[in-house]
Image (cartoon, helix red, strand yellow):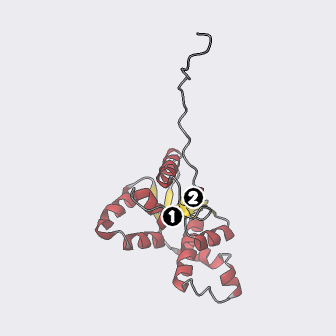
């Protein structure tokens, strides 16, 4: 099972979604749609469930506009997606998270809200309670919490490109012998 964060859901559902910035180039992720389409195809062929934690679902639906029900139908009726609630198992996982901010009781970075930190921790706790092995996200703080707790993360710019189709064309240039 893998987890999709809001950014990955948007990229997988909206073909017109603007790609995130690749930090290595400072430009939009190259061939973003092809990467995400290839990811969805690969996960589908492997029958890997895609978990959408309820905090992610809420964040997505807030910005979904009048198409909320259409998206809910996609998530709840598709065999590819599974919605994961913050339940008792997730609450127990949250209490056990390895998070330096929790351990040291230090003040949070002033640019990060407490709500954002709680939100990220809930996503990771839901992922752990469902035994997800990977989170697809563009959110660096979420990726850090996930990695600190044994869940691999893949940023959009790290999603592999689909393989190039083989070139079966033969060179048809005349040789010098003819």
Viewer-proximal residue, 155 or 75? 155
Separation of marks 1 and 2 at Cα, in angstroms: 8 Å
Q: Which residue is mark 2?
A: 157
Q: Position of residue 43 (x, y in %)?
A: 52, 50
The C terminus: image quadrant: top right
Report which residue position mark 1 lands on. 20
Residue 153, quarter of picture: bottom right
Task: Indicate the position of residue 112 as horizontal and vertical percent values.
Answer: 56, 83
Is residue 71 placed above or below 98 in the rendered structure? above
Q: Nearer the viewer, residue 163 or 151?
A: 163
- In-front residue for pair 168/89: 168
Q: Residue at x 42, y 73 (%)?
A: 58
Residue beneath the point at 38% across and 70% down: 61
Looking at the rendering, in which quadrant would you find the N terminus? bottom right
Considering every residue shown, the one lying at the far front of the view is 176
Return the mark for residue 67: none
Classify mark 1: residues with Cα within 10 Å, few (<14), some (14-19) or many (20+).
some
- How far across and how far down the image is residue 32, in percent? 50, 55
Asked if the residue at tag 2 contacts the one at tag 1, i.e. Cβ–Cβ closer than 8 Å, the answer is: yes
Q: Which residue shows up at 66% across the image and 67% down it?
A: 147
As drawn, the residue found furthest toward the top would be 178
Q: Is residue 132 shown to the viewer in this render?
A: no
Q: Residues within 10 Å of mark 2 (few under 14, many from 20)?
A: many
Quadrant assignment, res 162 = top right
Label 1: state its secondary structure.
loop
Q: Identify whether 41 is placed above or below 119.
A: above
* Residue 62 visible to the viewer: yes
Q: How many marks?
A: 2
């Amino acid at each position: 099972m893998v987890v999709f964060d809001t950014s990955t859901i948007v990229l997988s559902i909206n073909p017109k979604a603007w790609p995130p910035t690749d930090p290595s180039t400072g430009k939009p992720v190259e061939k973003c749609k092809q990467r995400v389409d290839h990811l969805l195809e690969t996960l589908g062929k492997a029958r890997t469930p895609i978990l959408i934690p309820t905090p992610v679902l809420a964040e997505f639906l807030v910005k979904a506009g009048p198409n909320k029900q259409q998206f809910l139908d996609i998530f709840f009726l598709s065999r590819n997606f599974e919605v994961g609630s913050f339940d008792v198992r997730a609450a127990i996982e949250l209490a056990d998270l390895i998070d330096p901010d929790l351990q040291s009781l230090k003040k949070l970075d002033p640019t990060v809200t407490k709500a954002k930190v709680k939100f990220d921790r809930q996503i990771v706790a839901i992922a752990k309670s469902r035994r997800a092995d990977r989170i697809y996200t563009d959110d660096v703080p979420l990726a850090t919490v996930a990695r600190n707790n044994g869940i691999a993360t893949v940023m959009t710019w790290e999603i592999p490109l689909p393989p190039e189709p083989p070139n079966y064309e033969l060179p048809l240039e005349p040789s010098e012998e003819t």
